[in-house]
Image (cartoon, rainbow, N blue to C red):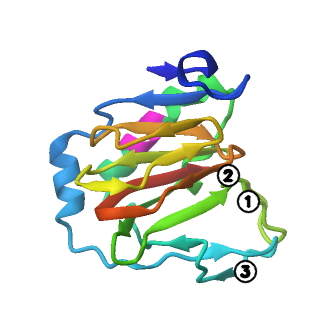
């Protein structure tokens, strides 16, 4: 399903690709029950790619390896392929990164307003599309917010893809733990 500005109350010209059941329950269970090491998520602070831990982003991140999670990467590529016509964006499969994000009530997990389209002076590629797939919904808060649209706990497996230039945030998790799979197409 494609959501456009009329249906979703997005600003004129903003489009978001939404697909329910983009990940099946067995893949979600595998990801949530994997022995994955989470570390504090970092934030890029300049065009050289310098990163730091910041209160603007309170969550933990686990980067997935294409060797260990090739089925997940294949599904991510399939979803980006489905969405790229809407956005008229091309991307490189070689540069795709996939992470699982964990936002907890104890950490007041959130990510303030930001865009994902970072361009580093030291590298020659830029994020084109951003993806978020909710893995669970046993939490409160933690909404994925755009300037005029809020996705409040979509069902697990729901994929949302949008241009990396869209300003967005993840609201504070006020109860429980929110897990999402995120990816960026370069």
| Spatial CA span between label 1 and label 2 | 6 Å
Check the picture and name the quadrant holding the N terminus.
Answer: top left
Disc 1: which residue:
118
**Is any part of residue 84 visible from this angle?**
yes
Disc 2: which residue:
127
Disc 1 on helix, strand or loop? loop
Residue at 67% across / 45% down in the picture? 128
Of 98 and 160, the residue lying toward us: 160
Q: How would you classify the magenta stretch by its main secondary structure? A: helix
Disc 2 on helix, strand or loop? loop
Residue at 80% across / 76% down in the picture? 48
Query: How crowded is the residue under tag 1: few (<14 C-alpha within 10 Å), some, or many (20+)?
Result: some
Magenta highlight on residue 42: no
Q: Which mark is residue 50?
A: 3
Query: How crowded is the residue under tag 3: few (<14 C-alpha within 10 Å), some, or many (20+)?
Result: few
Report the magenta residues as a range: 75-79
């Amino acid at each position: 399903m494609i959501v456009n500005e009329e249906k979703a109350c997005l600003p004129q010209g903003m489009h978001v690709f939404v697909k329910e059941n983009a990940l099946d329950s067995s893949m979600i269970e595998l990801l949530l029950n994997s022995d994955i090491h989470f570390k504090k998520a970092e934030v890029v602070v300049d065009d050289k790619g310098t990163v730091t831990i910041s209160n603007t982003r309170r969550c933990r991140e686990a980067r997935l390896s294409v060797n260990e999670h090739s089925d997940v990467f294949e599904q991510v590529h399939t979803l980006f392929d489905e969405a790229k016509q809407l956005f008229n964006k091309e991307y490189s499969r070689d540069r795709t990164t996939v992470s699982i994000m964990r936002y907890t009530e104890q950490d007041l997990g959130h990510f303030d307003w930001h865009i994902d389209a970072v361009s580093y002076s030291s590298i020659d590629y830029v994020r084109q599309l951003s993806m978020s797939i909710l893995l669970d919904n046993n939490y409160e808060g933690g909404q994925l917010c755009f300037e005029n649209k809020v996705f409040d706990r979509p069902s697990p497996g729901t994929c949302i893809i949008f241009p990396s230039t869209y300003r967005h945030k993840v609201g504070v998790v006020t109860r429980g733990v929110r897990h999402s799979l995120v990816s960026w197409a370069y």
